[in-house]
Amino acid sequence: MKLSWKNLLLWSLPIIVISFFIWQGFFVPINNENNNNVANSRMTYGRFLEYLDMGWVKKVDIYDNGHTAIIEAVGPELGNRIQKIRVELPASAPELITKLKSNHIDLDAHPTKNNTAVWSLVGNLLFPLLLIISLAFLFRKSNKTAGGPGQAMSFGKSKALFQIEAKTGIIFDDVAGIDEAKEEFEEIVTFLKKPEYFTAVGAKIPKGVLLVGPPGTGKTLLAKAIAGEANVPFFSISGSEFVEMFVGVGASRVRDLFKKAKENAPCIIFIDEIDAVGRQRGTGIGGGNDEREQTLNQLLTEMDGFEGNTGIIVIAATNRADILDAALLRPGRFDRQVSIDIPDFKGRLAILNVHAKNKKISPNVSLSIIARRTPGFSGADLANLLNESAILTARQRKNKITLNEIDKAIDRIIAGMEGTALIDSKSKRLIAYHEIGHAIVGTLLKDHENVQKVTLIPRGQARGLTWFTPSEDQSLISRSQIKAKIMGALGGRAAEEIIFGESEITTGASNDLQQVTSMARQMVTRFGMSSIGPLSLENEDPNPFLGRGMGNTNEYSDEIAIKIDKQIQEIIKDCHKKATEIIKNNRVIIDKLVDILIEKETIDGQEFRNIIKQYTKIPQKS
Ligand code: ADP
Ligand code: ZN
C-alpha cells in the first residue's frame, strides 16, 4: 500500500482513539498520585481519627474535593518520626473539620486546580500527537525517496503550487534532431509574438498542444524553447503530483495555475505527464479516483474558460496519447498533437553536436561513430552519455574526452556498472564458453548482427557479455533475422550443454531464454510468421496499467491457443538445434577462443573474426 495523506488519516484515527484509552488507563492515576505529593503509606479513616485523638497528627492537607487527605503524623507505629500518610476520607465527614479545628491542627485544603485538568488534557493529547508527527515524518520521507512530490502538505493555495520561470533561456538551437516538431512550434512562437497576424484574418490561435513521445526525447526542452524564443514566462506542473493528494487540492491547484497564467499572459503552461490526470475516466481500473477526475474536470473547465486569443498556450506531454480521455483531445482543448520519437542516426548526431559544444572532446573522436553505436538512445541518454564521459575523463585527470571514456560510458548506460572479473575458476570457464557460444553462433549466421566485443567483465546483472553492433534500421526485420537472433541467444546455453553436459547447465541463461520466448511468441502472434498463418492474435502491450498479459482479451479460441504454444515450441526447438550444430562443428575454434578470452577478459569484434577466419569461413552479412 502506498503511504498517502488519505491513508495516513485513515490509519491515524483509530490510533488516536486507541492511544487515548491507553493514556487514560495508565497515566491518569499516576497523575493523581503526583498531585497528592509523596505519600506511600496509607491509613484507614478510623485509625486516622484515633491518631487525632491521641494528638499524633501534626498537619492535614485535603485534596480531591475532600476525598483524600495527606497527613503528617508521628507515632509509635511510625518509628516516632514525622511521616506523610495518605488517608481516604468518607464522602461526608462533617465532624472531621470541627475536630481538626478543636485540636488546633494545621489544616489546608487544596482545591483541584483547573490547570491540572488542562495539563491532563494536554497529556492525553500528547501521545497521539507525537504518533501523528512521527507518522507524518515517515510519510514525508517515504514520499521523497519515492520521488513523489513531498509537498503534499501544501494544501491548495500554500507554497509550491507550480514552477514559474520568467525566462527559460532555452532557444530552438538547443533542441536538435526533432525538426518536424520544431517547425510546428515555430508557428506557435509567431502566435505568441504577433497574435494580430492571426486575429486580423479571424484565425483562432490554438489553445493546447499535446506532445507525445517516450521519456527523455526533449518534450520539456521543446516547450521551454518556445517560451524562450517567444520571450514569455513558462509555468509548469506535473500530472503525477496530483495523484497522491486530498480530494479537491488538484482542482484548486489547476485553478490557481490558470489564474496566475492569465495575469501573466502571454505565457506557456506546461503540464508534464498529463496521462496521470488525463487518463480515460470511468475505466474502473484500480477503482475510481475522485481526485484525478476532479483535477481533470477542472483542467477541462479552465481550458474552455479562456478565449483562444488570451495568449496562453497550454502544452502537455505524455508518452501515451491513446489512453487519454477523449474530452481532452476535443477541438478547443489539446487539438494539436505533435509526436516526438526516439531519434534516428541523424537526430542522434545532431543532439550529440549540441551537447558536445561545451565539452572538450579530443579531435580524434568522431561523433558520428558514437551516433552509430547508440541506436535506441534518447536525447536525454545522449546528453547523459557525454556527461558521463566527461566525468570519467576528469577522474583520470585528463584534459580531453577520448573514445575510450565514451565507450566506457556507453557500456555503462546500456548494461550498468562494471564489476571486477572473476578469478579463474570453473564458473569463469563456464561463463566464457557461454559468451563465446553467443558470439560464434552470431558470427557464423548470415542474418545475425556482427559481434562488437565479448567480455568476461561483469556489468549490472550480467556476469559476462557479448555485444553486437546494432543495425540502424530496427523497424523492418525479416523472419530469418529474427530466427538468427533466437539462435544467437540460444548459443550460450547450447555451448554449456555440449561442453559441460546436460546436468551442468546453469541458471545463467534465464535472461536469454526470456528473450527467446518473447521473440518466438511475437513471430507467431503478431507477425504472422508461423504455420498458423498471417494472423494478428495479440496486440503490443494492450494496457500498461494492468500487469503484462492481464489485459489481453484473448481474441482467439482455446484451440488456437494450443496451436500458438506448439508453434512457439517448434520455432525454439528448431533454432536450438541449429545453434547446437554450430557449436558442435566449431568445437576447436571455441576452445581456442575461450582460452584467449579467459586470458584477456575482453576480445573485440575484429580480433574475434580474425581468429575465426583462420579456421573457417565467415558468411558475408546481409
Ligand atoms: P522529456 O520531457 O521528453 O522527458 P526532456 O526535455 O526533459 O525530456 O529532456 C531531458 C534532457 O535531455 C534535456 O534537458 C536535454 O539536455 C536532453 N535532450 C533531450 N532531447 C533533446 C534534443 N532533442 N536535443 C537536445 N537535447 C535533448
Ligand atoms: Zn547468455
Image (spheres, helix red, strand yellow):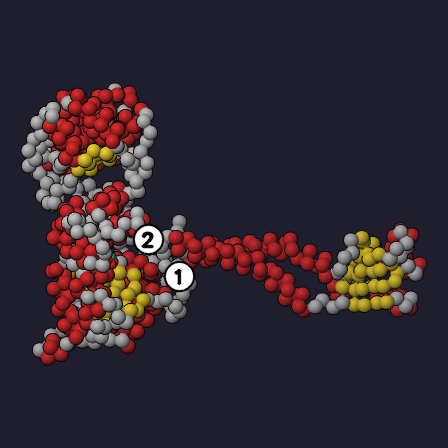
Foreground mark, 1 or 2? Answer: 1
Note whether ligand 1 is within 8 Å of mark 2: no
Name the residue carrying label 2: 287
Pointer 1 residue Cβ closer than 8 Å to ligand 1: no
Say which residue appears at 37% left-offset and 62% top-offset: 247
What residue does disc 1 label? 152
Residue nearer the viewer, 117 or 529 = 529
Give the amino acid at mark 2. Answer: Gly
Residue 453 location in percent, x, y?
Answer: 19, 36
222 vs 265, nearest the viewer: 222
Most foreground residue, 452 or 133 = 452
Work out whether 203 lies above or below 218: below
Occupied quadrant, residue 158:
bottom left
Residue drawn at (12%, 45%), measured in percent from left and top?
Answer: 472
Q: Quadrant of ligand 1?
A: bottom left
Camera-side residue: 198 or 612?
A: 612
Amino acid type at circle 1 is Ala
In the image: residue 25, left or right of residue 148: right
Which quadrant is the C terminus positioned in? Answer: top left
Neighbour tally class for label 2: few under 14, some 14-19, many 20 plus, Cα within 10 Å: few
Under circle 1, the secondary element is loop
